[in-house]
Image (spheres, rainbow, N blue to C red):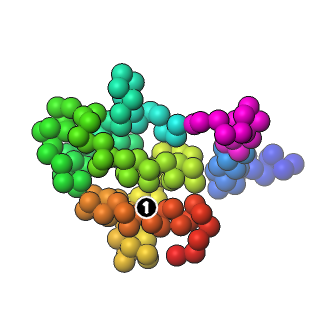
Amino acid sequence: MATAVIENNPELQTRFTELQSRVTALQEELQAIQRGAGALLVTLPELHDEATGRIDAQKVADYMGVPLKRLAEGLQLNYKAVHRSPTAEALQPSLKPVKRALEILHEFFHKPETVRVWLNTPHPDLDGDTALDMILADNVTAVLRILENAAAGVPV
């Protein structure tokens, strides 16, 4: 009976699927803990270049749903240089805080599309701006402060 109710209600189906996804993620997290407390994990390894291990600006831009040019200019980087070498060592200091913000969002939401929704939602603690606007205005620290506090359970 309950299955029929869920199947006939698209809103409940969506919610059920989201909850199943979260349960799966929690089960994976528990398994990782069981495999060895203190085991080192890399969050969002897909944002790194396989050959160098460095953060890849193009992959970060794709994950965020923005053109590379917009990300580069927003972080005050030379677009041509970023386009030519998106994993350059010189880019890493600018990309690290952006990736950290994406890691925290990934831990909260688990799905890139939900991360993008959050990034594009106006936030009262950012004076109504979106986190994406702040990141692309080279102000990732304001976004990180909100996310780090939320991750630590500290009210804003």
In the rendered structure, does residue 58 fall within the stretch colored magenta? no
Residue at 67% over, 47% down = 22
Decide: few, some or many residues near mark 1? Use Cα within 10 Å; few <14, some 14-19, many ≥20: some
Query: Height in image: 148 above or below 129?
Result: above
- The residue carrying mark 1 is 144
Q: Looking at the image, how many numbered discs can be counted on the residues?
A: 1
Taking the spot 35% from the left edge, 71% from the top edge, the residue there is: 129
Q: Which residues are magenta?
A: 25-41
Q: Position of residue 102 (x, y in %)?
A: 45, 50
Q: Nearer the viewer, residue 25 or 48?
A: 48
The single residue placed furthest to the right in the displayed view is 1
Of helix, strand and loop, which mostly describes the magenta segment?
helix
- Observer able to see residue 121: no
**Element at label 1:** helix
- Residue 119: name its quadrant: bottom left
Residue 136 placement (x, y as % from top left): 27, 58
- Image spot of residue 33 (x, y percent): 72, 39
Figure check: 51 above or below 101: above
Q: Is residue 99 above or below residue 125?
A: above
Going by the picture, which residue comes out furthest to the top?
51
Res. 110 visible in picture = yes
Q: Nearer the viewer, residue 19 or 133?
A: 133
* Horizontal side of residue 40 vs 28, given as left or right: left
Residue 132, quarter of picture: bottom left
Q: Position of residue 145 (x, y in %)?
A: 45, 66
User: Does the magenta portion include 36?
Assistant: yes
Q: Residue at x 35, y 42 (%)?
A: 60
Please tell me whether residue 152 is drawn above or below residue 12 in the rendered image: below
Q: As shown in the figure, which amino acid type bears the numbered disc 1?
A: Leu
Residue drawn at 14 percent across, 38 percent down:
81
